[in-house]
Each structure stands twice: as C-alpha cells, then as structure tokens.
Image (tube, grey):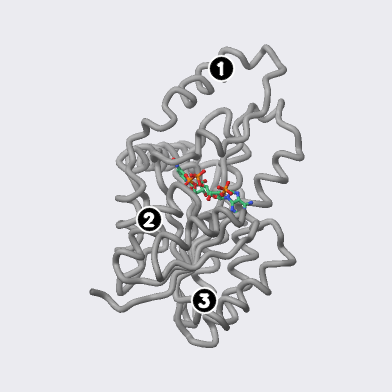
Amino acid sequence: MASSKTLLITGVSSGFGRALAQEALAAGHRVVGTVRSEQAQRDFEALHAQAVARVLDVTDFDAIDAVIADIEASVGPVDVLVNNAGYGHEGVMEESPLAELRKQFDVNVFGAVAMMKAVLPFMRAQRRGHILNITSMGGYITMPGISYYCGSKFALEGISEALGKEVAPLGIAVTAVAPGSFRTDWAGRSMMRTPRSIADYDAIFDPIRQAREEKSGKQLGDPHKAARAMLAAIEAETPPAHLLLGSDALGLVRGKLAALEQEIGAWESVTISTDG
Ligand code: NAP
C-alpha cells in the first residue's frame, strides 16, 4: 500500500465526496470530511474508525479558518484537500436571478478558495501537499441552461491552474478534476432549478431540462471508479494540473478544443492585425 495520508474532503454526505472518502478509507488513508448536519456527521463517522467529520457549510467563510486549525491540531496535518462540495444551478440566464449567480459562485468558487486559503499556510510550512478541485466538464464546455454553473466551474478551473503555478515551487500540487456525467445526487436533490418565465426560450431549454431530469441516477459514470481515479492522481509522482473523468467528458472537451482551434485559425489574420 502507498503511504497513508490524511485527506480533507468537503461534502462527504453523498456522491463523489462520499465515494472518495470510502475508497480512501479502504485504501488505508484517514479522511476528515465536512458535512452540514450533526446527523450526517454521525453517519460519516460510523463508516470507519479513521473517518472524522466536521460540520461546515463552505459559505460560512468566517468559520473556515478555525475548523482547519482545529483539524490540524486535533487530527493532524492535512496532506490532501479535496474541494468537492458544490451544486448545479439550472436555468436560462435571462430568467435566473442574480442572487442565484451569487449563491452558485459562493459555494462553487468562493467556498473552494476560502478552503484553499485556510489550508495553504499549513501546506507551505511543510513544503508539501496536494489540492484537488472538483470542477466539471462544464469548466471546459458549455450547454444552454447552465450558464451560472459553467461560469463557476470555468472560474474554478482558472483559479486552480494559476494557483498551481504559484505553489509548485513550494512543493504543493493543484489538480482540477473535471468529471463528465456521474451517478450522484447532482441532478437530483442537489440541483437548484430556476422556474420558467419567458416563452421565447421554451424550444431551446424545455427539452434540456426534461432530459436532465430523466437521466438523473442513470448517468454513465460510476462515482467509485472516479474516486479510484482521483486516488491514482493523489499517488502520482507528478500529479496532473487537469484530469478529465469519463468518456463523455473526453469526447466533448476534445470537440470543444478542436472547434476553438478552428475558430482561432479562421480569425487569425484579424487577431494579429492589432499588433504594432
Ligand atoms: P451530490 O451528491 O449532490 O454531492 C454534493 C455534496 O456537496 C453534498 O455532500 C452536499 O452536502 C455538499 N454541499 C453542497 N453545498 C454545500 C455547501 N454550501 N457547503 C458544504 N457542502 C455543500 O453531487 P456530486 O455530483 O457528488 O457533487 C460533488 C461535486 O462534483 C460538485 O462540485 C459538482 O458540481 C461536481 N460535479 C458533479 C458531476 C456529476 O455528474 N455528478 C459532474 C461534474 C462535476 P449536503 O448533503 O449537505 O447537501
């Protein structure tokens, strides 16, 4: 077995967070997981002797530093932080209130950044550590009806990649993990759906909403296989800055990059006409 590590994973009540915690515990690691209720805390700690839970909403920014300091003092140094907590907002952009955009970014972006800021001083002191940010294929490709979600995941991809360049000289690796569609609670209980109000968008959006509802629970990806892939990245000598998970993510992201390359080429002469 590879050396035992302490993983801090946000959002271990279900989905990827739960699966990664279970696979990591089975592989001999210790897991501190965050949850949002005392019941979920008891459920998580009942999984395994090496499972520790802390109640934390990642948007409770003022509470994060103390929770991390307490984990470092009472459990031990965090070797790996996994920013997994997040959710999807679904809604046509024009129909979706700005308050929903703020909420989406508070959880998916500000929460993840606040966690990284709290953990980094400890990782820097040790000159080692690994941060995994769970983004999405929606951090590369976009679809109508999830503009706020894609915006949040593009943001986390960008922050993750830039941070990786800042902390690599300090012995800390940062990996943005971008899954395709997986069988978690993402499109079910966790999704925030803005109600419809503008008939002009019926044709483009209604089939998308319906298809996502119907597919929930039947997606291609297995979260436990994703968890094992993440553990492989954690064990890697040189962890990747970006890791796609799922053949759907692979095909769609490659398609996006090819289309982008083609458009860049088509407009190249205009692009370079602005120099000088
Ligand atoms: P999930 O089963 O709904 O799990 C989401 C987890 O995040 C839950 O533990 C939830 O806690 C927690 N959470 C949500 N908001 C939180 C907050 N404000 N503070 C703390 N915890 C919070 O869905 P999942 O698919 O595993 O989602 C995990 C991550 O994967 C998300 O970032 C999601 O965007 C990303 N992702 C999912 C897919 C997919 O197809 N499933 C694809 C790409 C990316 P509660 O139980 O308390 O709600």
For the residues labelled 1 and 3, say whether their Cβ atoms are less than 8 Å apart. no
The C terminus is located in which quarter? bottom right
85 left or right of 132? right
The structure residue drawn at horizontal position 33% and vertical position 50%, both measured from the top left corner, is 224
The structure residue drawn at horizontal position 55% and vertical position 35%, both measured from the top left corner, is 189
Mark earlier in primary sequence (1, 3): 3
Look at the picture and state if 269 lies above or below 12: above
Check disc 1 and report the residue beneath it: 206
Check disc 2 and report the residue beneath it: 243
Mark earlier in primary sequence (1, 2): 1
Is any part of residue 173 visible from this angle?
no
- Which mark is on residue 235? none
Check disc 3 and report the residue beneath it: 167
Q: Give the mark count.
A: 3
**Residue 102, position in %: x, y?**
72, 45
Mark earlier in primary sequence (2, 3): 3
**Residue 164, position in %: x, y?**
49, 69
Q: Secondary structure at mark 2?
A: strand
Is residue 71 or residue 109 the one in the foreground? 71
The structure residue drawn at horizontal position 60% and vertical position 44%, both measured from the top left corner, is 151
Q: Amino acid at mark 3?
A: Val
Q: Secondary structure at mark 3?
A: helix
Q: Quadrant of residue 64?
A: bottom right
The N terminus is located in which quarter? bottom left
